[in-house]
Image (tube, rainbow, N blue to C red):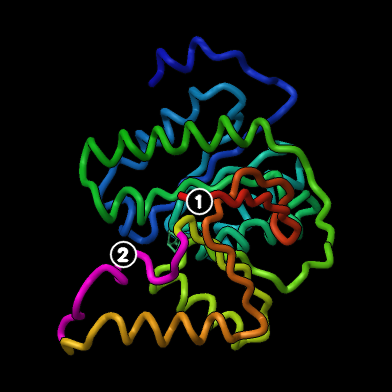
Amino acid sequence: MADDNKNRKATPEQKVGVYVCHCGGNISDHMAVEEVCKNAEKIPGVVKVRNDVFMCSDPGQELIMKDIKNGTVDRVVVASCAPGLHETTFRNAISRAGGNPYIYEHANIREQVSWVHHGDQATNKATRLVAAAAAKARELQPLEPFRVNAKKHVTVVGGGIAGLKSALDLARKGIEVALVDKSPFLGGWTAKWDRVFPTDDPVSELVTTLAAEVLNNEKITVYTCSRITAFEGFIGNFKLTLTQAPP
Ligand code: SF4
């Protein structure tokens, strides 16, 4: 890892801080956190590496906030649990310190590392995840959030049992649905079977009932013999191009 880092060009104008969490032993009992930190110090652009027993605690967040406030760092990587748990916590800490919350990158070294690996394997994987997050952090630019008027519309791809159920569930919530399937009929693979386990019910009844519900639902538009051949846009504003042709 050290040799790889020597060959990379540093971006001196961006100062990355790396903060590695022990999670009270959940992480540090399975890897050498000190070694992960030492390796992080060699990553181009990384100017500060700290570790803490509980990075999401007030004192842990304070470490990050202090480094931002005094200008030591302007990009932040936290190596800890899954981002779903505390990404927002750390973005908010950066905001409270006067920074832009989008200068933040998360490395998951708990669920993706210490919960599934141990020893050198865990240390090496955590080192690489931190290096990847730090490299990405150097590219991050401050962003301003904005709102778009999202149309309540969902495209479901695949008209098998899962697709039919999904389309119906969405339609029942008042959402317009486009159901797209490449084949000329609904039901997918299941429609080719005879009976379902464990009830032994005939598949034809199940598929026919569901397909009839979908076809009679005014909120669902069904496109058979169709494929998505292009898409553009972003979350809340996607545009898809469908091409209809016999399979
Ligand atoms: S930030 Fe996540 S990994 Fe660290 S102490 Fe809190 S819950 Fe554990």
Label 2: how many residues lie within 10 Å, few (<14), some (14-19) or many (20+)?
Answer: few
Question: Where 138 sits versus 169, above or below?
Answer: above
Question: What's the mark number on residue 246?
Answer: 1
Residue 108 relative to residue 199: left or right = right
Report the image quarter containing ligand 1. bottom left
Residue 82 is situated, as x and y percent measured from the top left of the image, at 45, 58
What is the secondary structure assignment of the residue under circle 1?
loop
Q: Disc 1 vs disc 2: which is toward the camera?
A: 1
- Does the magenta run of residues contain 227? no
Residue 39 relative to residue 85: left or right = left
Query: For the residues marked 1 and 2, what is the alpha-carbon distance in whole angstroms?
Result: 18 Å
Q: Which residues are magenta?
A: 184-198
Question: Where 174 sits versus 189, above or below?
Answer: below
Question: What's the mark number on residue 189?
Answer: 2
Residue 156 is situated, as x and y percent measured from the top left of the image, at 55, 65
What type is the residue that disc 1 sits on? Pro
Residue 231 is situated, as x and y percent measured from the top left of the image, at 67, 46
